[in-house]
Image: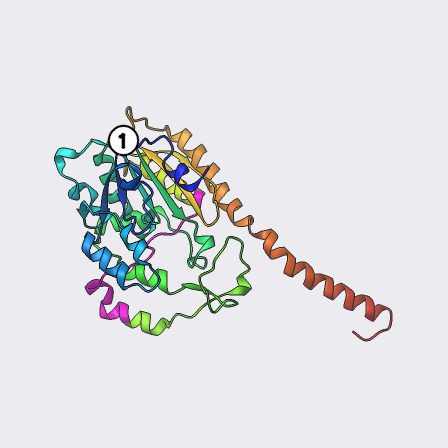
Amino acid sequence: MERRDIILKGISKTDLGIEVAPWLAAIAPRAAGYNIRILDVFDTETLRARGAADPNQSARDCTAIEEVDFVGSATEIAALVPETDHGRYDYIVSSHNFEHLPNPIKFLNGCAQVLRPGGVLSIAVPDHRGCFDVFRSRSTLADWIEASLSDPQKPSPAQVFRAQSVHARRQDTPSDPYAFQMGISPARLGCETDLRALYDDWKKGTALSEYIDTHCSVFTPASLELMLLDAQYLGLISLEVEEVSNTTGVEFYVRLRRPIAPRQLSPQEHIERRNTLLRRMVMEYSEKLPERKMPLLRKITRKLRALGRRLRGKTP
């Protein structure tokens, strides 16, 4: 299936939907007949001005920017959508936006308010092993709970520091330092962050006075599914996980649904499902082992050859 077909699975053009921050690549464009509303932190004029000022974008690309209906952070989706329209929307789609949200729990609960019973939230999320977050540790439910309690309106100083302090770049392709892929050898990666300057910015409160866009959360498929499962079990969110795909390219896809008849997992069911996901999280990192075995195998082979020469009385 094509990427768009995966994200829009089960969604028709007549369904009423919201797309979050599509920029130049709307998944459900109005031009294709979708009954869609657009939510973005910038209004239409600002988006088009930013697009026109970007030398990497063409004039044709900028015309693809959709008219924005709801202006503000996606975290505030429940406040941005008129209360009279709550419970009306059939679906919400988002591509590479969820990881930017400083308060994911608030966003998920906002989506539950806006969606009708049975409505779907469908998102595409980068796998941190295949992007500039590769050096980072996976986010945890504790990170989400902490953000939910403090309710940041923008990425917090800690979230900015956490992301930028280990921001990875390709060392072997200086002309394209962000040409990432899954399973890339760590030997080809590096981090060039000025850590002292970053720390000074934190102390000065730079992130408090400015909106610094960053990946506030990072995931693998199993780690995100575990966080969603645990959040739902604890009553932090009401959306239920319908499907989490494996990684395709450098991203994976998640479908959540506002349940018509909510079902609470028993403690035993929850333990069984989370243990399965915990084991999968470990297995996800073992998926990279074949890529790392080859250099090790060559190193071992060289040592064995050197040992063989010495045993035959030859110089290594």
Q: Which residue lies furthest to the right in this view?
A: 312
Quadrant position of the C terminus in the picture: bottom right
Q: What stretch is highlighted in magenta?
A: 201-221
Q: Residue at x 23, y 67 (%)?
A: 206
Examine the image and state in which quarter residue 10 appears.
Answer: top left
Q: Where is residue 126 in the image (x, y as percent from the top left)?
A: 41, 50
* Viewer-proximal residue among 56 and 216: 56
Residue 204 lies in the magenta-colored region: yes
Query: In the rendering, at what x and y percent does residue 57 appear?
Result: 33, 59
The extreme bottom residue here reads 315
Q: Which amino acid does label 1 sit on?
A: Asp
Which residue is outermost to the top? 261
Please say if 14 is above or below 283: above
The residue depicted at 59 percent of the width and 54 percent of the height is 291
User: Is 12 or 216 nearer to us in this picture?
Assistant: 12
Residue 79, by quadrant, is top left
Apparent side of residue 280 relative to residue 207 in the rendered image (left or right):
right
Colour scheme in use: rainbow
Number of marks in the rendered image: 1
Q: In this view, does 188 lie to the left or right of 60?
A: right
Between residues 275 and 11, which one lies in front from this camera angle? 11
For disc 1, the neighbor class at 10 Å (few under 14, some 14 to 19, many from 20) is few
Residue 245: image location, x then y, percent? 45, 39
Q: Give the residue at mark 1.
A: 15
Tell me which residue sits at (84%, 68%) in the image.
311
**Relative vertical location of residue 220 with respect to residue 50 in this rendering, above or below:** above
Q: Does the magenta stretch include residue 49?
A: no
Look at the numbered disc 1 and give the secondary structure of its residue.
Answer: loop
Percent x, y of residue 243: 41, 34
Give me the residue at 28% from left, 46% from top.
104
Q: Is residue 213 left or right of residue 254?
A: left
